[in-house]
Image (cartoon, rainbow, N blue to C red):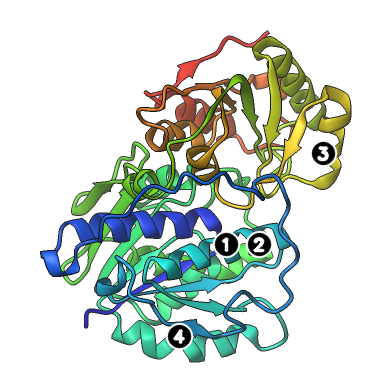
Amino acid sequence: MTSRLAFVESPVQLLNVLEWAHTTAASVPPRLAAVPRQPDRREPAAAGRAPAADPTGGPTGPGATAAPGGGPLSGLGLTVVVLSPTDPMSRGQLRRMAQLAREEGVAVKWQDARQGRGAVARTLRELAGPLRAAERVIVGDPFSRYVQLLLGLFGPRRVTVVDDGTATMEFAAQLARGERLVRWHRRGARGPRELVLAPVTSLARRKLAPGRRRTVEIFTSLPVQPPPGTTVTANDFSWTRARFGPPRITRGSDLVGTSLVETGVVDPDEYLRAVTVLARTHGATRYFAHRRESAEKLHRIAVETGLEVVRPDLPLELIARRGPIGRTVVSFPSTVVHTLPLALTGTGVKVAVCEIAPEWLRENASPRAQGFLAGVAGTATLTERLEFG
């Protein structure tokens, strides 16, 4: 059987691996094609409840692999390796996404790659064999040091990169320019850690570039400028639409949160002021929190704006598709201004984007921040642009 191996570190990455698998299954012979599924019209009872901490390493246990159960994607020979993060919110959402993947017939291996001494060496030993045997490797985060180390040691012949938020846009641009792989919100200075890891990053960039002995595919819902020789496949969220919904639509509006404060890009007081103005202007009642937003910031938002803060237990694309969801969804520049219109196609829900004003940025924000965020908003052709104030 064809061996396909995916590495994910976030719920959104796993969602996009499932979207890639669904698209791939639709293009192979009928015996491997996905089995039609009735949409799931149940309301998500736990949509607003934060998942509990996950001390066991996930639903399958540390290092265990859940065998596919004959779902519509079982014929692809796909195994997803979850390089588990440490924060409880991400682990909780990943636990839910892993269950959805198993229901689709995908094998899931939960790897506690960051816990305990010797975790890195143990992970490399356990994954060396599957990596060497894989016909294709699917990468959720090409900027991940863990993934870069794995690819540097065991370079695959066929690589697919799926979306990890708007970072995909920067990855494609940096790859095309031959630059080192650096997240857009990082400042230009290179500290001791960056210098030590520079050889790993340089080798990984070569392993992620197309060449005579390597094919590279970018599976994305975002506008990208890929280097020559790279295949770009559109992600239209067809799996999400087939699996969930259509949603119940409420009369009001919803706001979508961002972790730009937590990543050091936006000033927290300016962010709170913007949320307050948007909620009042658009009659919003709920605030869908990003999984990386701090509890302190969310408490302040709830107290000072009166918004109901919702911590989704699945990626927002799935939560919105299942519903209930507001007739208008307002977001700051982020991945969802590109993905939500695709996931909600045909529902009548309007997605609007509010750009980040220059005065909201922190003094030590990356010099690239304003231009990158403006590009995220400006290229979102299926959203409405908002005037702030």
In the displayed structure, would residue 158 be above or below residue 2? above
Total labels drawn:
4
Q: Are marks 1 and 3 in contact (CB under 8 Å)?
A: no
Work out which quarter of the rendered image holds the N terminus and state it: bottom left
Q: Which residue is mark 1?
A: 96
Q: CA distance from mark 4 to mark 3?
A: 38 Å
Q: Amino acid at mark 4?
A: Leu
- Pick the quarter of the image with the C terminus: top right
Q: Which of pointers 1 and 3 lies earlier in the amino acid sequence?
A: 1
Describe the element under mark 1 as helix, strand or loop.
helix
Q: Are marks 2 and 4 in contact (CB under 8 Å)?
A: no
Q: Is residue 20 left or right of residue 319?
A: left
Q: Position of residue 234 (x, y in %)?
A: 27, 44
Q: CA distance from mark 1 to mark 3?
A: 25 Å
Q: Residues within 10 Å of mark 2 (few under 14, many from 20)?
A: many
Where residue 387 sits in the image (x, y, percent)?
Answer: 58, 9
Contact flag, marks 1 and 4 (Cβ < 8 Å): no
User: In whole angstroms, how far apart are the C-alphas of marks 2 and 1?
Assistant: 7 Å
Compared across the picture, whether 272 is left or right of 199 comes to: right
Badge number at residue 297: 3
CB under 8 Å between callouts 2 and 1? yes
Task: Tell me the kind of residue under disc 3.
Answer: Lys
Q: Quadrant of residue 355?
A: top right
Check disc 1: other Cα within 10 Å, few if <14, some if 14-19, many if 20+. Answer: some
Q: Is residue 181 visible?
A: no
- Give the residue at mark 4: 127
Residue 214 in picture, x, y percent from top left:
22, 68
- Give amino acid for label 2: Gly
